[in-house]
Amino acid sequence: MSYTSTTFGTVRPIPPYRPPSSTDRVATSARAWLHDIRLHADGVTVDRSAHRETGIRRLPVWAWRALMLRRATPVHRFNLHPIDSVEYDLDLDYVGDGEKIHRLDVLSPKRDAGAPPLPVYVYFHGGGWTSGDKDPLTKYCATQAAEGMIVVNANYRMATRFQLKHMMHDGNAVLDWVARNIAAYGGDPTRIVLGGDSAGGHIAALLTAAAYTPELAEHYGIRPPVAARNLRGLVQHCSIADFSVLFDRGFVLSLNFVRMLLPERGRGQHLRTAARFMSPIEWLDRGFPPVFVTTSERDYFYRANLNFIEALRARAIRVDTLIYGRRSVNTKHTWQQDDTHPESQEVYRRLGAFVRAIAPRAVAVT
């Protein structure tokens, strides 16, 4: 059985879809935390007709960068009141070239020597592929470490100087470093969860898809250093796992973002064909790990998140969701970084529970 992508016009095999039973719907609805969101009659699917997006359309790259710089929060604001129960190993060089863009942090809860290894949460910051840095995410990552995991917070090369292939190579290098070194920090390299916000979430999702799909890995010239079975989950904060929305006239980003991420700005390439290799939603199968998605009606990429959720459910892939309505004023794009909001605290609680559920410690057999 196969399906045709409505945007990219490609045919890919997928598992046969089984319509959800009443039992399935109850279970799915219980995981879908929807705050002030209008639902369809099935009680699960979000009604897009009730959605009003940001009102911003077709921003060029330079305008998006200006918007991100204007909204950028000073490092110290998000990192107020450090968490003392966490160990901070900062600015580790994961490539060996001495560049800050190739540095990562490891944050781990303080524990007694000989404590059992913990799951590993690898995080990539957002910034529209053009800006951002790991440093403002230190408090966010420390909060997750305090939940009982080893957190890796990584930088990577960005546009417009670099393209998506460079970001994928850097993300792959981070995973290679994790596979070789994380045990020394108390992490279990067989229990890895990838995550990120906005563009970082997109990179995390594409790396996850590449681990399961040789064609996608080959396209970017990478050899995944972590076996697919060891990627236990994926976290998406206001991410964009469906690039088809960039071809919608009302979308916030212009098509120049697709060109920007391609070699030679996509000269000689058919954009819709090229965009398929940027779109994680196009590379799902039953082996794909569980996903935790957080978004809101105030999120620039809200529609892409809804599309990703529906695609995961259609393929019987576990997806946990936390979705806020427009009346939740604290839930603008990438609000999850700011721990002063109760909505962010709910994200942290749910994220910790998600990681514990999908990456549990192996029980010793006696």
Image: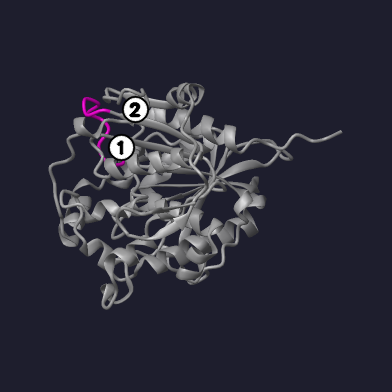
Question: In terms of depth relative to the viewer, which is nearer, 167 or 233?
Answer: 233
Q: Residue at x 24, y 44 (%)?
A: 300
Residue 194, percent across and down? 50, 48
Q: Amino acid at mark 1?
A: Trp
Question: In terms of depth relative to the viewer, which is nearer, 130 or 228?
Answer: 228
Q: Which residues are magenta?
A: 325-335
Most extreme residue toward the front, as rendered?
1
Q: Residue at x 62, y 50 (%)?
A: 230
Quarter occupied by the C terminus: top right
> Which residue position holds label 1?
335
Q: Would you say the magenta stretch is mainly helix, strand or loop? A: loop
Q: Is residue 152 magenta?
A: no
Q: How many marks?
A: 2
Q: Secondary structure at mark 2?
A: helix
In the picture, measured across the screen, residue 300 lies left or right of residue 133, that is left
Proximity of marks 2 and 1: CB atoms separated by less than 8 Å: yes
Q: For the residues marked 2 and 1, what is the alpha-carbon distance in whole angstroms?
A: 8 Å
Q: Residue at x 30, y 31 (%)?
A: 46
Q: Secondary structure at mark 1?
A: helix
In the picture, measured across the screen, residue 255 lies left or right of residue 135, that is left
Residue 80, percent across and down? 36, 36
Question: In terms of depth relative to the viewer, which is nearer, 349 or 150?
Answer: 349
Q: Amino acid at mark 2?
A: Glu
Residue 91 can be seen in this image:
no
In the picture, measured across the screen, residue 356 lies left or right of residue 303, that is right
Residue 301, percent across and down? 27, 45
